[in-house]
Image (cartoon, grey):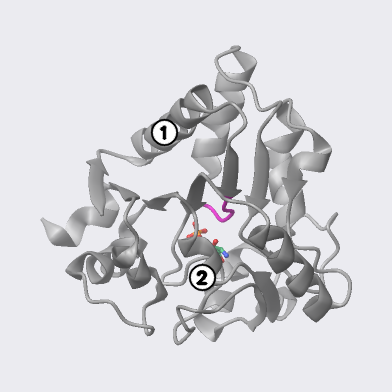
Amino acid sequence: MKIVVVENYEKLSSEAARIIINQLKKKPDSVLGLATGGTPVGMYENLRKAYAEGEVSFKDVKTYNLDEYCGIDPKHPQSYHYYMHQNLFDYIDIKPENVHLPSASENWENAAKAYNDLLNQTEIDLQVLGIGSNGHIGFNEPGTSFEQETFVVELAEKTRLDNQRFFNSLDEVPRYAITMGIKNIMQAKQILLLISGKNKAETAKRLLEGKVSNDFPASVLHLHPNVTVILDEDAYGLQK
Ligand code: GLP
């Protein structure tokens, strides 16, 4: 696990975007695994800028998102479909047919299986991850088996409380999501994990301690051969 500590959120965002841009320059038809949440917003901003300035093209890129809430329409402002269009897809030259997210407005179990089948037919070159304060990756909550494939997950109370800030009330936060499983995530050739902010410092500390356990899903990344973790100083704080 390669650890990169940068001064602040701006640097984390530009450094993360730089890794993706370099990947696309090296392999223009890369397959990217993408994440949502607050953390990668700045990275997407940098990618939009790089595209607008002609530095990079997404015309042959394929993307697979980690997860989607169940029971909210793709047009809902808090759906991850909406997020991805707002933050990236609507501003770049990616082909609509090359964009993939779990489709959680239909039969959830069938949709999870269909997404898993899709993932098993591809190989992700670079998977971007954020981390939940409880150590979740995608929506793989504490206790999830490392062998888990894409599934319908009941969100942990802590996750719903953390994500309440994006909704009008806790009641509106979905209770279920479809997420790539830990096994799918671990099949990516390369993984980029972003951790930002003081509120993630305890989480970062626990990850960097290096103990691998189902109780802390992100710890599985210690078992992957090609992981880069970018932390800003606020997130790294407790290691100083
Ligand atoms: C969300 C997402 C994760 C994300 C994490 C952290 O619920 N499912 O993919 O990495 O929680 O989000 P944030 O970056 O907003 O802290």
The tag earlier along the polypeptide, 2 or 1, is 1
Q: Residues within 10 Å of mark 2 (few under 14, many from 20)?
A: some
Q: Which residue is mark 1?
A: 19
Is residue 149 part of the magenta span, yes or no? Answer: no
Q: Which quadrant holds residue 197?
A: bottom left
- Indicate the secondary structure of the residue bearing disc 1: helix
Q: Main secondary structure of the magenta part?
A: loop
Q: Which mark is residue 183?
A: 2
**Residue located farthest toward the front when viewing the structure as drawn:** 121
Is residue 37 part of the magenta span, yes or no? Answer: yes
Q: Position of residue 35 (x, y in %)?
A: 57, 53
User: Is residue 227 at least partly visible in the picture?
Assistant: yes
Direction from residue 122 to residue 131 in the image, left or right: left
Give the amino acid at mark 1. Ile
Q: Position of residue 6 (x, y in %)?
A: 26, 39
**10 or 192, which lies in front?**
192
Q: Which mark is residue 2?
A: none
Give the amino acid at mark 2. Lys
**Residue located farthest toward the right when viewing the structure as drawn:** 106
Q: Position of residue 203 (x, y in %)?
A: 32, 68
Give the residue drawn at x 14%, y 60%: 239
Give the residue drawn at x 66%, y 44%: 63
Task: State the extent of the magenta-drawn residues as a range.
Answer: 34-39
**1 or 43, which lies in front?**
1
